[in-house]
Image (tube, coloured by chain):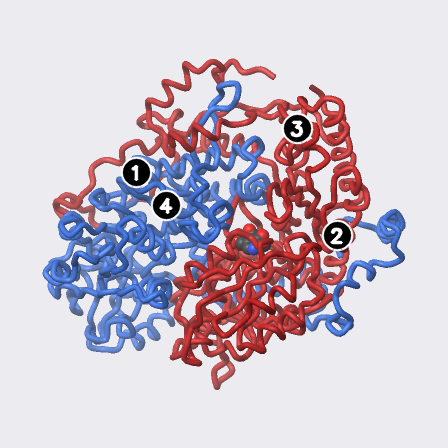
Amino acid sequence: MKPKSRKVSQHVTQNEALIFEKSSPGKKAYRLPPLDVPDVDAGKLLGEQVREDLGLMPEVSEIEIIRHFTRLSTWNYAIDLGMYPLGSCTMKYNARVNEFVARLEGLGNSHPYQPEKISQGALRIMKTLSECLCEITGMDVITLQPAAGAHGEFTGILLMRAHHESKGNPRKKIIIPDSAHGTNPATAAICGYEIINLKSSAEGMVDVSLLASLVDDTVAGMMLTNPSTIGVFEKDIHRIADLLHDKGALLYMDGANMNALVGKTRPGDFGVDVMHLNLHKTFSTPHGGGGPGSGPVACKKLLEPFLPAPVVTTRADGRLGFEYNRPQSIGRVRAFYGNFGMFVRALAYIFANGPDGLRQTTEDAVLNANYIRKKLDGIYDLPYKTGSMHEVVFSDRLQTQNGVKTGDIAKRLIDYGFHPYTTSFPLIVPGALMIEPTESESKEELDLFVDAMKSIAREVEEDPQLVISAPHDTRVARMDETTAARKPVLRWKPEQTNEARQSPKPELVETR
Amino acid sequence: MRYLPKSPADRELMLEEIGVRSVDEFFKAIPGEYRLNRDLKVPRQMAESEIIDYFRDRSQENAAGYSVFLGAGAYHHYRPVIIDALVQRGEFLTSYTPYQAEISQGTLQAIFEFQTMICELTGMDIANASMYDGSTGAAEAILMAMRVTGRDQSVIARTVHPEYREVIHTYLHHRGMPMHFVGYAEDSGEVDLDQLERAVTEQTACVLIQSPNFFGSIEDVEAAAEMAHRKGALLVVSIGEALSLGIVKPPAAADIVSMEAQSFGVPLGFGGPYDGVLAAKEKYVRQMPGRLVGETKDRNGKRGYVLTLSTREQHIRREKATSNICTNQALVALMSTIYMDVYGREGLKDLAKQNLAKAHYAVGEFARRARVLFPRGKRFNEFVVQTKEDPHAINDRLLEKKIIGGFALEKFYPELGNAALWCCTEMNSRAQIDAAIEAVQG
Ligand SMILES: Cc1ncc(COP(=O)(O)O)c(C=O)c1O
C-alpha cells in the first residue's frame, strides 16, 4: 500500500538481533592498559564477597557494537529526520553546538565535589543560566536541581507546602484542572495533598466562578498549565491568581508550554508564584529517547527561604560558591546540583537566540500551530474554538463515524513519514489529536504534514480499513500490547532466542 | 535566527493564508498589561564561534587535566569513544519516549538490553528503563517498599551516601513517614548489625543499606536481608559504584536494588545527568515506578518491543500512579548499555580487578603515613584515611600539583575528625598515587 506522499519512499532496513545473540566467549571490545601496581588476588581480598562470574553479560567486538546500535538507530524516528509534532512535548531542533560545548573537557569531565576554586566556570554557567531564566519567567529566584518537569513539580509543590507550614499549617488540598497532565495529580499526591479536580469550562478553560467556590483556607494552591493543554492562554489568569491569593493559596504554573510565551509575556508578571521549566522542551536540550531532562523551578521572593540547598552564591571576594546553610530549605531533591550537562546546553541555546531570536522563536511556534489549525479545521473537528497558541487540539469526532480513532490516524501518519501527534491527551478532549509543530518546521514541511492529514481524512471516508490497519510500511506493526502486559517479558533469556528462531517470520528471511 | 527555517516571505504568506494581518493577533489573548513590550534582558544573539569561545573560557576556569581521587558517588572511569559516537546519532539523541513502538524499535530494543544486563549484574529479576539518579532512585525504592508492605517506616544506614539520605528525607518527612538511622561498626565501617536488628520492627517497610557503602566498605547483604525479612520488611540495597558489580557478589538477597550507574560510561559532568537504575524481584513488578519495556510480537508474529505495564504510570493512573516520573534518563542509560557491551562479561571483571588492585596499593602506601580507618572492612575502590592535618589543607597543597584529593568527611561524619574518603580507579597511575601520598605526609 503506497502512501501518496512526497515525503517518503521505502528503503532497505537492516535486521539486527539482540546483542546477547551475537555474543560468544573470547570476543572482546576492550583492552586495558597494563596494571602498574602489584596485582591482587580478589578471592583473598574479598573472601565470600567475591564474584566469579558475570552470567549472561555479552562478549562482542567493537565493530559489532557499532553496527548493532547504528542499525537500531535506523529503526527510530527523530527530529533530525522530520517533523515530530508530539503535542505538549515541544520537539524542537536540538542544536549540535550544544552537544559540542557540553563535552568540553573542563565541563564534561569535572567532578561535582572538586574544590570551588577550580569550579568557577561551572558555577558561572549555573549563575548566568539562572539569571536568564529568571528574566524570561519574570520570577525572582530559581533552583536548577530538579532533574525533569515532574521532579520540578515535586519541588515546587514542596516549596508551597513549606511556605504554608511556616505559617502554621501545610493545608490539605491542591486544585488541578481536568485538562492537566498526569504528572500534576501524581505530584500533588506524593506531596501528601488531596486533589480537587476542577472541571473545565465550555471553552476548555478555568471556570472562574467554579474555582471561586472551591478556594478556601484548606487549599494550598492550584497547579495550572498556561497556555493550557489545549494550547489556549488562560485569559482570566490574573483573576485566578487573585482568587487564590485572597485566601492565602498560591499559584503553581506547569511551564511545559513556555514555548508559547518566551519573550512575549512573563508568568511572574501575571500572578504566578512558582513554576517549573522543562529545559528539554522550551530550551532545546535533547529528549534522547525519553531523557535526560531538567526541570528548574523559579519562584517569587516569598518562597526563596525554602529553596533546595545548595544555592549558588557570590562570596565576599567575588568568587562563586555553593551555599548550604539554609535552615528553612525543603532539603535536597537530588544529589549534587542537578543535570548540569543540560544547563550548558540550555544556556548555549539562549546565547544562540538572544532576545530577538527568542521572541521570533515563540512567534514562529505560534504561527506554525495556527497555520495547521487553519488548514485542517473542518477536516478534523476542532472542539474548542478559542484562539490557539503553540499547539492545536483536534478531535476524531468526524472520523469515528467511520470507525477510525485518533490512534489509527496517528499510526497512518507514520506511513506518511511523520511521527504521530500526541493521542488521547488532554482528557477533556475525547479522541484528541494534539499537534505541536514547534518553530523548527519550515512551510514546506508543514505543507507536507497538512497534505498527509488531509489525505488520511480522505482515506477514512473511502477506505477506513486502510487507516485502521496502519502502519503498513514499518518493520513491525501493531504490537501485541495485551500479551506484553499480561505476561510481561522484561528481560532476555536464552530460551527466548530459540523461540524467536522458530517464529513464523524469522528475521533472516524477511523481505520487503 | 539560524535555527528558524522561514524567510520573511514565508511568514507573510502563512499569515495571509491564515487570514490575519500580523502575528500579534495570536497573542491578543494575553491581556495587554501582561504583554512584554521590550526585549528580554539576556545576552545578545551570538555566532556559533562566540558560543564556543564563551564555554571554552568557562571550561578553562574549571578543573581540567587534574588527577582525581574523588569518588563519593561520582566516579572517574575511562569512557570508550564509541559511546559518544553512537549516542550522538540523531535517531537516538532527538527522539522522544518510545510511545509509538513502530518507529521506536531502536530505543525500545536498547532499553530491553539495558534491563537485561542490569538484572544480570544486580541479581534481580526485573529492572526499569532508568530513574533520575541514584539518590531519587533510592527514595523511590523506599516508597515502593511502602506500597508493597503497606507500612510507612524505614530503617536507613548512616553509611548510605549523605546526600542520598538528604533526598530521602525530603521525599518522606513531609508525609510524616518515620526514618530510623543506624550507625556503623568502628572496625569495619559496615552497618552496625546489632543496632540494625533492634531498629527493625513490625512497622518497618524496608531497610536501606548501601554496598559498597559511603566509606567504601562492602556490606553483609545477606545478614541485613535476614533481619529485614524476619520482621516482614524488604531490603533495599543502594549501589553507588556500579563497577563494583564486576568483582563483588551481587546483592541477590535484596528485594529492591537502586543503583547509580554513572560509572558505566557516563561523564562526571559536574554531577549530572547521571543514570539511576531500579531493579527488583519479579513479584513486585506492579509496584515498580518508571518505564518498563517488554518483549512481544507484532501482528505478523515478529519479535518486537513495547512500553508495558503502563497502568502503573502517571499518564494513565494520575494521582494513584506508582510515581510521578515521566521523563527519565534514557540517553544516559544508552551510554551505560554501550559501556556494558564494550566491557562485557570479562571486561567488567578485569576492570573491576584493576580498581581493586589500585585501591589496595594505595591503602598499603597510605597506611605508612596515616591511619586507614575500618581495617576489618572489605573494600572495592574507596577507603577512608585519617590524618593529623585537616584534609582541606592537604587538598590545597595537592591542588598545586594538579591533584584533587579525597572527600573531607567532617561535614557529614564529624566524629571521624580529620578523615577523608579516597577513591582509586583505573585512571589513577601509580605515579599519581605516590605523588598524592607524599603530600599527605605533612
Ligand atoms: C503539560 C506537561 N506537564 C508536565 C510534564 C512532565 O514533564 P517531564 O516529562 O519533564 O517530567 C509534561 C511532559 O511530559 C507535560 O507535557
Q: Secondary structure at mark 1?
A: helix
State which chain disc 1 sits on.
B
| Residue shown at the point (40%, 42%) measured from the top left | B339
Give the spatial CA distance, label 4 vs label 2: 41 Å
* Residue A345 appears in the picture as rendered: no
Mark 1: few/some/many CA within 10 Å (<14, 14-19, 20+): some
State which chain disc 2 sits on.
B
**Do dots 4 and 1 share one subunit?**
yes
Q: Secondary structure at mark 3?
A: loop
> Is the C-beta separation of discs 3 and 4 under 8 Å?
no
Residue to which mark 4 is pinned? B288
What color does chain B have in the rendering? blue
Three-letter residue code for mark 4: Met
Note the chain letter of the red one.
Answer: A
State which chain disc 3 sits on.
A
Give the spatial CA distance, label 4 vs label 1: 10 Å
Residue to which mark 2 is pinned? B4
Mark 4: few/some/many CA within 10 Å (<14, 14-19, 20+): many
> Is the C-beta separation of discs 1 and 2 under 8 Å?
no
Three-letter residue code for mark 3: Gly
| Residue shown at the point (57%, 50%) measured from the top left | A286
**Does label 4 or label 2 sit earlier along the sequence?**
2
Residue B310 percent location from the top left of the image: 46, 41
Residue B39 percent location from the top left of the image: 75, 71
Three-letter residue code for mark 1: Glu
Give the spatial CA distance, label 2 vs label 3: 39 Å
Residue to which mark 1 is pinned? B282
Residue to which mark 3 is pinned? A403
Residue A488 percent location from the top left of the image: 38, 32
